[in-house]
Image (tube, rainbow, N blue to C red):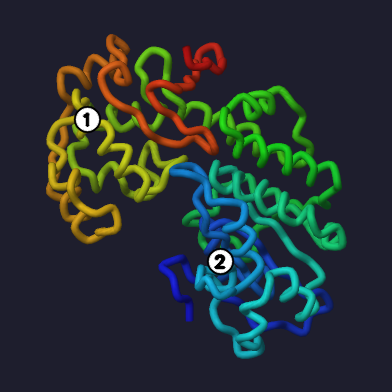
Amino acid sequence: MPTSSAPVSFCVGWGASAMRRVILTSSSGIGLAHANRADMVVPLIFRFVSGPLPSAMHLNRYLRGRDTSGDICWSDCVRQLPYVYRADREDALLRFCETYGVELIELWFDPEPNSQLQLIWILDYLRSEPSITASLRLRCVDFELRGADPRELRQRAVGKLDISDNDLEIASIAWEAYRASTPELCFGLLGRQLGRLSFLQPALEVLFAELPSPTTGLGATELQLLDLIASGHSRTAELFRPNAPGTRVFDQWELGPLLEGLALGPMPAVAGLDGKLATLDPDNARGRNAAFRRSRLSLTDFGKAVLEGRDDFRRHNPIKRWWGGTHLTNERLWRWDPETRSLIAPT
C-alpha cells in the first residue's frame, strides 16, 4: 500500500493484449486509472508552481526507485498489483517497464500549468534514455483531466503523436529555463516554436502572470483572491474549493500561503484571517484548516486601493516566494506587465 498522502492510482489487470502500455500523467489525471486505457497508470505527484523546486537529485531518485533514504518513489502512487513482485515495484520506473514488457509509454498531460511543467520534466529525464524514445507517445489532451469522468475518458478520442528528438530537446531547454535563477530564459520561449509541446507556451503565459504586476505588486491569483473577497466571498471554503476562480495555477494547499501573505504582512490587504495562522506549524494541517474555516474575510482600505491599482502592495510588505528557480524578494523583484507582455527586471 502507498506510504504517502499522494493520490493512489489503480490499474487494470496486466492484460494479454498485443501491446502492453503504461500511462504517465499528472495527479490531475488520476481518473485515467479507472478508465481502462492502459495496463498501469503512474501519476506524478510533484508541484512545480509554488515553493522552491525539488533538486534534480531528488527528482531522479523518485524515478529510480526505492533506496535507503526512505523517500517516496514513483510506485508509491500505484496500487499493489497481484502480478507484480514487490521488489520490482521498488526498482527504477524504466527498468520496471522493461521487466514487464511495456511497449508503449503514453504521456497524458493536460494544459494546466503544473501538468505542463511535469511533462517537460519527465521528457527531460527520458531524454537520457535514448532507447525509450520509440516507445513514447504524446496524447493531445486539450481538456482538463482533473474531475473528468472515467467513463467518458474510457471512450474519448484523444490524438496521439510520436515524440521526436527535437521535442525532447525543446523539453530539456524549457525545463532548464524554468529552473534558472531568473525568468529571462523562460521569457525567451514565448517567441519560440515549441514543436509538439503546443500547450507549453500558453501555460508559461499563465505562469508569467503570477509574477508581481508593475502596478499592484501582486500576481494574477493574488488579485483574483482580492476581487473575490471584494465581491462578498468572505469564507475560505469559497476561495479554496476545487475549480474555484483563481485555482487554475495553484491548488487549495498553495492558496492558503498566498492568502496569508495578503493578510498577515505589515500593511494587510485582507482583514479577518485568523491570526493563529501566523504561529501554527506549516505541517499542522488540522490546526491550519480549522483556522482558515474560522476566518471571515474582507478587504482593508489598502486592499481596495491595491485592487483598484492605486497602490503597490510590495512597497509596503515583504515578498519571499518562488517562481520556478527564481527567488523573488523585494530586493530582487521580477515583474510582469500583462498589457505589454513584457518582463521587467529588478531595478
Image vertical order of residue 123 relative to residue 221, above or below: below
| Crowdedness near tag 1: few (<14), some (14–19) or many (≥20) residues, C-alpha within 10 Å | some
Q: Residue at x 14, y 31 (%)?
A: 271
Q: Residue at x 84, y 42 (%)?
A: 166
Earlier-in-chain disc, 1 versus 2: 2
At label 2, the amino acid type is Arg
Q: Nearer the viewer, mark 1 or mark 2?
A: 1
What secondary structure is found at the residue carrying circle 2?
Answer: helix
Q: Which residue position is annotated with label 1?
A: 265
Image vertical order of residue 323 relative to residue 79, above or below: above
What secondary structure is found at the residue carrying circle 1?
Answer: loop
62 sits left or right of 140 in the view: left
Where does residue 263 sit, x and y in percent of width and height?
21, 33
Relative depth, front residue between 209 and 179: 179
At label 1, the amino acid type is Gly
Residue 285 is drawn in which quadrant? bottom left
Where does residue 266 sit, x and y in percent of width and height?
19, 26
Image vertical order of residue 254 relative to residue 333, above or below: below
Q: Residue at x 25, y 38 (%)?
A: 260
Relative depth, front residue between 261 and 219: 261
| Crowdedness near tag 2: few (<14), some (14–19) or many (≥20) residues, C-alpha within 10 Å | few
- The answer to whether the residues at label 1 and label 2 have Cβ atoms under 8 Å apart is no
Where does residue 114 sit, x and y in percent of width and height?
54, 45
Q: Which residue position is annotated with label 2?
A: 151
Image vertical order of residue 234 relative to residue 279, above or below: above
Q: Residue at x 63, y 29 (%)?
A: 186
Query: How many tags in the picture?
Result: 2
